[in-house]
Amino acid sequence: MSLLIRNGRVIDPAGSVDSVQDVLLKGDRIERVGKTLAVPADTKVLDATGKIVCPGFIDLHVHLREPGQEYKETVATGTRAAAAGGFTAVCAMANTHPVNDNRAVTDYIRARAETDGIVRVYPIGAVTRNLGGEELAELAELAEAGCVAFSDDGKCVMNAALYRRAMEYTLPFATPLISHAEDHHLSQGAAMNEGVVSTELGVPGAPAAAEDVMVARDILLAELTGAHVHIAHLSTAGAVRLVRDAKARGVRVTAEVTPHHLLLTEEAVRTFDANTKMNPPLRTKRDAEALVEGLIDGTIDCIATDHAPHATSEKEGEFDRAAFGIVGLETAVGLLMDRLVTPGTLPLATLVARLSRDPARLLHLPGGSLAAGAPADLTLLDPEARWTVDPARFASKSRNTPFAGWTVTGRPWKTIVGGRIVWE
Amino acid sequence: MGWTRKDLLTMRALDATEIVLLIDTAASLQEIAGREIKKVPALRGKTIVNLFYENSTRTRTSFEIAGKWLSADVINFSASGSSAAKGESFIDTARNIAAMSPDVVVVRHSSAGAAETLARTLPCSIVNAGDGAHEHPTQALLDLLTIREHKGHFEGLNVAIVGDIAHSRVARSNIHGMRKLGMTVTVAGPPTLIPPFVQELGVKVAYRLEDAIRDVDVIMMLRLQQERMTAGLIPSLREYSRYWGLTLDKLRAQARPDVLIMHPGPVNRGVELSPEVADGPYSVILDQVAKGVAVRMAVLFLLAGSKAGEQA
C-alpha cells in the first residue's frame, strides 16, 4: 500500500525543503521526496496541487481527560479533534482521574490510544504523586512504560527542593520536566491577568510575576542539575526574556506558547465570557507581541495548544467560578495561518517548524521530518480555504473556545498518520 | 432623550446624559416617599424578581420598596433556603426564574460579571444590584443624587474615596459616574488596598488620609472587610483605624467646613468612621439610604415602565 502525494508545496524544515515536489509513502514510512516521481505499482495518487505538505504536526500539550473525565473528552474524541486540526501526534497531560502517576494509568492510556485513537498519543507522567507536590511519582517506571516527559501541569511543584530532585532523578531517561510555572501564592484566587482590566472589572488577577518568578527558579534549577526543563504555555514578556537569556547562557531550557496567548489579550475578558478564562491568563498586548517575537527568533521552541476541554455547564456561569482552559486542537492551525502567516508576521516555514520539527526534537519523538525512512505522518494544508469557527461542528466533545465565529483563511486539508489518511 | 437600554449593568457603559436622566427621574419620584398613600400605578402588572445571592439588607429592601411603591409584583429570592442551596447552578436557577416571565430581574452576586452573564442569557431586563468587586450602579446613582441635592451641581467638585478601593464595587461605579459628570476623584488607602493601574481610570491616588481629604467637597468612606487582615493586606484593625479612620479631629484639621461625609453602609463604627463623624453634622449617610429608594424606582420605571408607555 503506497501513496504518492503529487505536486504539493513541500515544507520540511528538518531538511530545509520548501518547494513543489512529490512525496511517496510506502507502508507506514516515507519512501522519498522528489520532483515528478514515477508512480510505482499499487500506488494511490493524491493530487496536492495548491496545497502545502508538511511533516505531521505534534501538539505536546493536550488534556485528553481519559481516564476519569470522559464527559469532557475521551481518547477517541480528543484524537479526532487532533486529526481534524492537522495534528498527527499529541502528548497527553497527567492530570487525569486517577492521575497518571503510576504505570497502570500509563498502560491504560496507551491501550486506549491503541484501540480508540486515530493519531499517536504520548503520555506525560506526573512529577509528584497525585499532583500533590509532596513526593515523587515512580518516575523510572513511568518512563519505562512510555511516558515521554513529566509534568504536574495545572499545578506547579512549589517545593524547589523536590523539583530539583525530580530533575536529577530523571536525568538518565531523557524525559524533560514540563513546568507549569506559577507561584500559587502570588496567583491565589486569581481568575485573570492582574492589570488595568482586572482593576476595572473587579476580578482578582495574577501578576505576570507569578509566572516569571517560577520560570526564573526553574532555569536556575536546570542550571544546577543539568536537566532539561521545558516551560509550558509561556505567557509573559518577562518569561520570554528569562528564557532567551538562559538559552544564551547554554541552560537546557525550552518553551512553548499557545495560539490564544499569541492572538488574544486580557481585553477579551471584558465580556465576562468564561471562554476567555485560562491559566496562565490572557495577558497584555505587550506580552503577546513579545511572545510572537520569541516564537520567530527561536526563544520559544514550539506551539502547543493546551487543549483543555470542559463541559458547557462548567463555562457558562459565574466567571470566577468557571473552569480554566479552552479547547485548541481544531482552531490552532487555521488561526495561526490567518493571523500570523498571512499578514507576514511569521514565515510559514517557521510555523511548520514550530509545529513539527521542533516539538519532535524536544521530546525525542519519531516524526517531525520528511526524511526517507521517517514515519509517514503528514499534515496537508489548504492555504486558500476560508472557514468560520463553529464549535457545534467540533470533533471534540467540548465547545469551550473564545474563537467561535472567527473567520479565517487556511486550514488542515488532510491528516496522514502511519501512511493512512485519518482525516480529510 | 429617552432611555433605550434593556439592562442596567454598569456605570461604565452609561454616558453623562443617561446618568442625568436617571438622576432627574429619581429626583422627581422622591416626593412619593412623603405621600399619605405611597403607591403609583406605573408598574402595575409587572413582575420584578430580586435574585440575591449575597446577603443584603439595605439594597434588597430598597429595591423591594421601590417596586412596591410602583405597584409591581415583587418576589424575593435569596440563595440560602432555595434551590441554590440544593446545588442548582446560578445559570440554571436564573433560567428557571426566567421561564416564569418576570419583566425585571434584580441581581446581587459575589462574582464579578454575574449581571452581564445573566443579561446575555435571559430575555428580561437585568439590574445589577452589586456584582463582586465590579460595579454597583444604583449605589453610585444614589450617591450622585445625594451630592447634587447638597451641592447643586457636579462639574468641578472634588471627591475623595477612602479605604478598600481594591475590593469595592461602590468605588468603581462612583469613579465612572463622577468622572463622566466632570468631578475630580482621588482614591486613598494603604497601597495594598489600591488596585494596580487605578490611575488609568482617571483618578488621583493618595497614600495619606490627610492629603486625600484636604479641601475636597465630598469624602466617601468605604467599609473595611474583616477578612482583609487574614489576607495579609493590612496588619491590624487597630493600625488601619489609626491611620485611615476618619475622626472629628482629622476632619476639623483638614477638611472644608461644608464637606459631605458619605458611606455606602454598613458602617464599622470606630474603624473607618468614628461615631461622632458618622452621626455628625457633615454626615449624609441616612439621606443616601432615603435616596436609594427613589433611584431604584427610577431604574425600574425606566427599564420596565417606559416600554409600556405608561406614566408615573
Image: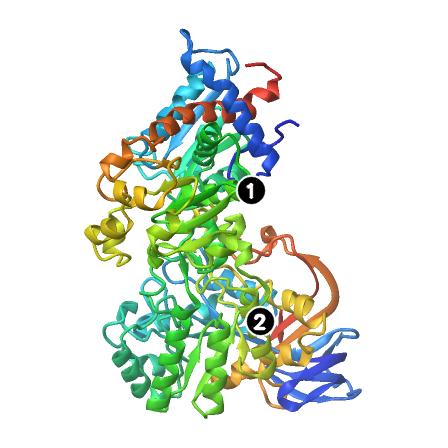
User: Does residue B33 lie above or below B12 as drawn?
Assistant: above
- Mark 2 lies on a secondary structure that is strand
- Mark 2, residue position: A87
Residue A416 pos. (x, y %)? 62, 74
The residue carrying pointer 1 sits among few (fewer than 14), some (14 to 19) or many (20 or more) residues within 10 Å by Cα, namely: some
Instruction: Categorize mark 2 by other alpha carbons within 10 Å: few (<14), some (14-19), many (20+).
Output: many
Q: Nearer the viewer, mark 2 or mark 1?
A: 1
Q: What x and y, as percent, mark residue B47?
A: 47, 20
Q: Which chain does the numbered disc 2 sit on?
A: A
**Residue extending furthest top?**
B36
Q: Quadrant of residue A182?
A: bottom left
Side of A377 where B151 appears, left or right: left
Q: Nearer the viewer, residue A259 or B183?
A: B183
Residue depicted at 52% across the width and 42% down the height: B183
Q: Where's residue B56, x and y in %?
A: 32, 33
Residue A376 visible (yes or no): no
Name above or below for residue A371 compared with residue A272: below
Task: Residue A369 in the image: state x and y as whole percent.
Answer: 60, 85
| Residues indicated by labels 2 and 1 sit on the same polypeptide chain | no
Left/right placement of residue A98 relative to residue B291 reads left
Q: Which mark is residue A148?
A: none
Q: Which residue is mark 1?
A: B182
Image quadrant occupied by the N terminus of chain A: bottom right
Residue visible at 37% across and 49% down in the picture: B167
Query: Which structural element holds mark 1?
Result: loop
Q: Amino acid at mark 2?
A: Phe
- Asked whether, in this view, residue B3 is left or right of residue A79, the answer is right
